[in-house]
Image (cartoon, helix red, strand yellow):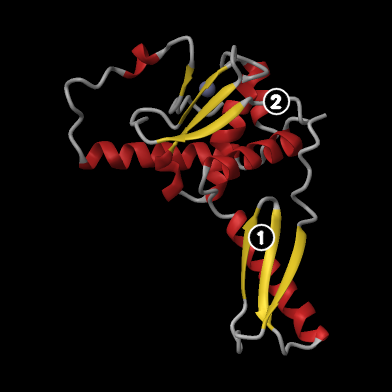
Amino acid sequence: MDGGEQEEQPQVEVRRSARRKRTVSAYEEGGRTIVLIPDRFTAAEEAQWVSQMLGRLAARRHRTPRGDQELQERARELSRLHLGGLAKPTSVTWVGNQTTRWGSCTPASGTIRISTRLQQMPSWVLDYVLVHELAHLLAPGHGKDFWALVRSYPRTERARGYLEGFVHAERGSSRPTTSRRARGSRTTSRTAEPAPAPAS
Ligand SMILES: [Zn+2]
């Protein structure tokens, strides 16, 4: 019920410029896609280039969201695709200081925070963490009901394996600091990641 479905059909505005000779560029601005083309382009060239530029932008979108707004849009889309749109976060933001978690969620306020470390990983790993935190808005703990929700995201097991491998590799190459808490003590009112629980 939150009308956030503008994603599939982007609004496109084509701007012609006499100064442009051959370069075409495109960017997103206020929910619209602006495509800049040379003035002398024919209608056919325009159509071809617009579709090409939209494809490029879409590919970029399906890589890693950059700002918080893109991250939030991605979370909404994932909620729609995998959780029936039932998880409705009030905010989804990147945070740079979460060194021991991939993401966290505060169900009471509906806020989700995602570690910027995930920006270096494949987007399907980020998507898993988003689905994980979104599912916590519906099921706080890590019980069966929770995993049933999360597993509607098809790459759940692969992503968990990926993150687990990442943590192992990192531990092997850097010495943990003494201030780092033991894994088991990280349980707070917020739900914490990483929690590479055994795959069942
Ligand atoms: Zn969790």
Q: Tag 2: residue type?
A: Ala
> Alpha-carbon neighbours of circle 1 within 10 Å: few (<14), some, or many (≥20)?
some
Say whether residue 158 is visible.
no
Q: Picture quarter containing residue 133?
A: top right
* Residue at the spot 48% in from the left edge and 39% down from the top edge: 161
Q: Nearer the viewer, residue 90 or 98?
A: 90
Where's residue 24, x and y in %? Answer: 62, 78
**Residue in the image at 76% along x and 63% along y:** 12
Tally of marks: 2
Q: Quadrant of residue 112?
A: top right
Height in image: 136 above or below 163?
A: above
Q: Earlier in the sequence, mark 2 or mark 1?
A: 1
Q: Secondary structure at mark 2?
A: loop
Measuring 68% from the left and 65% from the top, which residue is drawn there? 34
Which percent across, then down, holds residue 106? 54, 17
Circles 2 and 1 in contact, beta carbons < 8 Å: no
Residue where numbered disc 2 is placed: 87
Secondary structure under tag 1 reads helix
Spatial separation of the CA atoms under disc 2 and disc 1: 24 Å
Amino acid type, mark 1:
Ala
What percent of the width, then of the height, locates residue 87?
70, 25
Establish if 54 lies above or below 1: below
